[in-house]
Amino acid sequence: MKYFLDSAKMDEIRYAYETFGIDGITTNPRHIMLSGKPFLKAVTDIAGWIKAEGLSGADVFPVSVEINPHIDDADEMIAEAEKISAISPNFVIKIPATEAGVTAARKLEEKGIRTNVTLIFSAAQAILPAKNGSMFVSPFIGWKEANGEDCREYIRNIVEIYKNYGFYGKTEIICAAIRTPKQIADCAVAGADIVTTGLDVYKDSMKHAYTTQGIGTFCNAWDNTAVE
Ligand code: E4P
């Protein structure tokens, strides 16, 4: 399973790449706002870092960048997506899972512009983007679970549908808005291709009280043992 970082902050991107070897980045308008930079500056900074790291290329290190969420017309979505995708070969354009969104995504994929159909909250919403050849779909997990839903079946259903119809591995499933290490594991068990989350969740995923306690136990033993 691939790990993407959900952030537009350069310090977090550098840290996550160096420390965890993340496989890509996802952003959304909220993450861009939190970077404190204007939209174009935030995304061109990411594009510049990719180039400097030698990660440039369509299939190397995908970076999802969302179009202006106010746009609800397919042709306008396409025009906006074309402008954004010209900034970097790594950019994958995030389009909302609406009727206009899937229309735009299908036409963009036909033009060779890769798409990530986002804001997916039902298995049914994940089918058309896969039929139409989108590179990614982003079912949101954390937002649903924050409202009391258990998403394990929801993810399993998308995986099963994709396996039934030959979409699995072609349109990759990014489980998005992951908030806890348990959700990462749930996505892995269900067979999701990718999870995307913030730096703190990746950090937390490597913490366990017994690991800390075990290191203490072994330090104590080490300190009470002669080396030679
Ligand atoms: C995924 O691609 C989205 O950017 C995302 O996971 C949404 O998460 P947020 O709720 O942290 O903005």
Image (cartoon, rainbow, N blue to C red):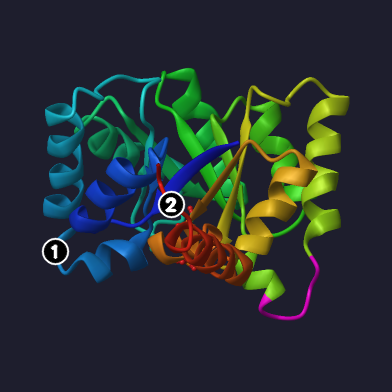
Q: Residue at x 63, y 54 (%)?
A: 184
Q: Locate residue 22, reporting x and y percent.
A: 40, 40
Q: Quadrant of the N terminus?
A: top right
Tell me which corner region of the image, top left, top right, bottom left or bottom right, holds residue 52. Answer: top left
Give the answer, above or below, for where 25 lies relative to 131.
Answer: below
Residue 109 in percent (x, y) is at 49, 24
Mark found first going from the N terminus, 1 or 2: 1
Residue identifier under label 2? 226
Q: Are marks 1 and 2 in contact (CB under 8 Å)?
A: no
- Which stretch appears magenta? 146-150
- Disc 1 is placed on an element classified as loop
Q: Residue at x 19, y 53 (%)?
A: 10
Count of labels in the image: 2
Q: Quadrant of residue 12 in the image?
A: bottom left
Q: Nearer the viewer, residue 172 or 183?
A: 183
Q: Residues within 10 Å of mark 1 (few under 14, many from 20)?
A: some
Give the residue type that dot 1 points to: Lys
In the image: residue 177, left or right of residue 171:
left
Residue bearing mark 1:
37
Secondary element at tag 2:
loop
Q: Please give left or right for residue 74 compared with residue 67 in the image.
A: right
Q: CA distance from mark 1 to mark 2?
A: 56 Å
* Residue type beneath disc 2: Ala
Residue 80, compared with residue 145, is above or below; it is above
Query: Which residue ends up furthest to the bottom in the rendered image?
Result: 147
Task: Give how far across and how far down residue 139 sits, in percent.
Answer: 64, 53
Of circles 1 and 2, the one toward us is 2
- Overall secondary structure of the magenta stretch? loop
